[in-house]
Amino acid sequence: MEQWKIAQQTIANKESDMNPVTRLLIPGTPMQSIPPDPRALGTMPKGVKVIAVPDIPVSQLVLRDPAWGRHSDPSGVIDCGAQLLAHACVDIQTNTVYAASSLIPQALEWEFENVILNSLGYDISGR
């Protein structure tokens, strides 16, 4: 609940970057943001599930990219599908947040922001 409250405060009090992933994948894409939205403070985590997923061992990650050899376990990453590695990810259709076991609760805030923004009607496809 603490991470949910932080996510609420972030959206209510700060500009939200709506396309960081798009900008990472397509260099030169201009930033899209929304102003603070105080409605976030009234958005509750009704029906939101959090599932801890075991971190992918570094020994498996080095098979994908030898650069992982500089890391140690726990890796802090999970497979979010389509070969996307991340600390956490969300399935908006089911309001389920998946997070690396070693990073719960800190990895939850960003995904909770996504759930809140979606529930407020924002397009989160670029996040």
Image (spheres, grey):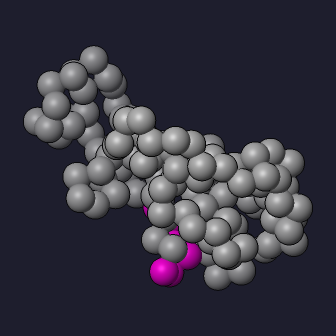
Q: Nearest the camera: 30 or 14? A: 30
Can residue 36 be seen at all in this image of the molecule?
yes
The residue at 78%/74% (across/down) is: 44
Which percent across, then down, holds residue 4? 74, 59
Q: Is residue 78 above or below residue 98?
A: above
> Viewed as shown, does residue 32 lie left or right of 102?
right
Which percent across, then down, holds residue 119? 68, 75
The residue at 34%/57% (across/down) is: 80
Q: Is residue 26 above or below residue 119?
A: above
Q: Residue furthest top?
A: 70
Residue 70 placement: quadrant: top left
> Viewed as shown, does residue 18 lie left or right of 44?
left
Residue 7 placement: quadrant: bottom right
Q: Residue furthest left?
A: 63
Is 95 included in the stretch rendered in magenta? Answer: yes
The residue at 45%/42% (across/down) is: 29
> Viewed as shown, does residue 16 lie left or right of 96?
right
In which quadrant will I find the N terminus? bottom right
Q: Is residue 124 above or below residue 18?
A: below
Which percent across, then down, holds residue 25? 34, 43
Which segment did they paint magenta? 93-99
The residue at 48%/80% (across/down) is: 93
> Viewed as shown, does residue 99 lie left or right of 5?
left
Which percent across, then down, holds residue 123? 57, 68
